[in-house]
Amino acid sequence: MSRRRRRMAALLAVAALGAAGCGSGGGSSAAAEAALPSPPPPAVHRRAGFATVSMTGGGSGWALYNTQPYQLVLTTADGGRSWQNVTPRGISPRGGMVLDAIGPAAAWAGYLPYDLERDSVLEGTTDGGRQWAPAFPPGGIASAYHPVLDFLNPSQGFVLFPRRLVATADGGRSWRMLAPPWQGTPPAAAGMTWTSPQQGWVYAVRDGQLALWSTRDGGQHWTAVALPAGAGGRLIPLGLWAGSAGPRLPVADPAAGGLGVRVLFPAGRRWRAGAPLRLPSGRLSAAEAGNGVVVAWSGPHHRPRLERWSPAGGWQGGPLQGLAPGSRVTALAVSPGGRVYLAAGGHGPVELYRLGRGKTVRPLHAQVHL
């Protein structure tokens, strides 16, 4: 699967990282937006600007954009220089949205209605956001949380709730009920990635322990994955992606005198952990990049850093030029062509940047038409 993929499975982790007290900035990042923990109160304050970004190729992309009091869905067709508001009409999201960008014209958005007596709602588009079709996955009270979305195409996809997993093969007109691999207490964070309607992986953090499962029959049966020694404990997942090179699970260890970042990946029948990257306490965002991972770090008094990991080369990177010390990176995206985009800001709104030559980022001066 060659798309931008699986970054929405990363929408849970760094919120948990901030909750654990390891991020000096607190809050959530674009690579880690709270999904399964308890929903926020109706009045939610969000920092204005880009919250998530996903570039789908050919200069096209999608984003969630913070305004008060809601988030908006935006699209671009010129590499992020200008953005159009294509938010589904009539929605009143209570605690923000999640967005799964499938391609230049196709995406799914999930949100919580303001009235929590209703189930969470999905809306899908195949024409770039001009028209959206609602879908109502079954969930009952369990769906009073942000869903986790992973769609293979506009018709086939999976939606994860705290107590159940559902799948559709007809664009949300009908749903198939599946059991998540855990039982009992819902996890504090969870995510998933699918490479086909049959093969997928799900992770969960429960009681401070990270666990990973795989399936080859569309979620009917799950097999626990044996993680490398020491890969449980307090490790916080930053995302989960599965492309042609196999699944990648970057994790952060907040007990390593700051942050220790490693990538877990399969090597034959076993999983191994790549060499750790040592960073000070701060905020982390992660994104898939080819057969590797890109991680952005930001913290007080220092320039943000961009680090790339690959199985052959390990970690390579350093501080970013073009961003002031103390700037906060809130979103990270890598286009299918390999271009890196960041959303970052100091005291003002969060703006969009693109990585140029070397380690220099340049502002796109994005025009946002609300």
Image: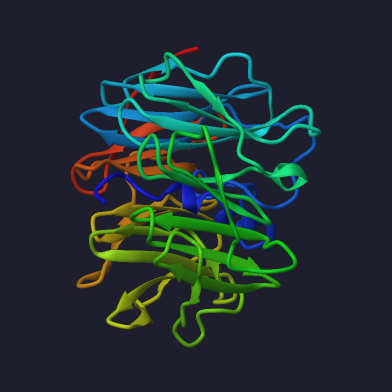
Q: Position of residue 69 (x, y in %)?
A: 68, 22
Q: Quadrant of residue 82?
A: top left
Identify the residue at horizontal 65%, vertical 42% (top origin).
138
Residue in the picture at 60% in, 61% down: 179
Q: Position of residue 43 (x, y in %)?
A: 78, 29
In this picture, is 154 found above or below 293?
Answer: above
Question: Measured along the vertical axis of the image, is residue 32 above or below residue 109?
Answer: below
Q: Quadrant of residue 258?
A: bottom right
Residue 323, position in %: x, y? 39, 40
Number of numbered labels in the structure image = 0
Residue nearest the observer in this picture, 8 or 222: 222
Viewer-closest of 314 and 300: 314
Residue 238 versus residue 98: which sits nearer the camera? Answer: 98
Instruction: Judge left or right: residue 167 versus residue 361.
Output: right
Q: Is residue 325 visible?
A: no
Residue 259 in percent (x, y) is at 52, 68
Q: Is 245 left, or right, of 143 in this rendering?
A: left
Left or right placement of residue 282 versus residue 320 in this view: right
For image coordinates 75% across by 32% down, the residue present is 118
Q: Is residue 124 visible?
A: yes
Q: Which residue sits at x=74%, y=43%?
A: 140
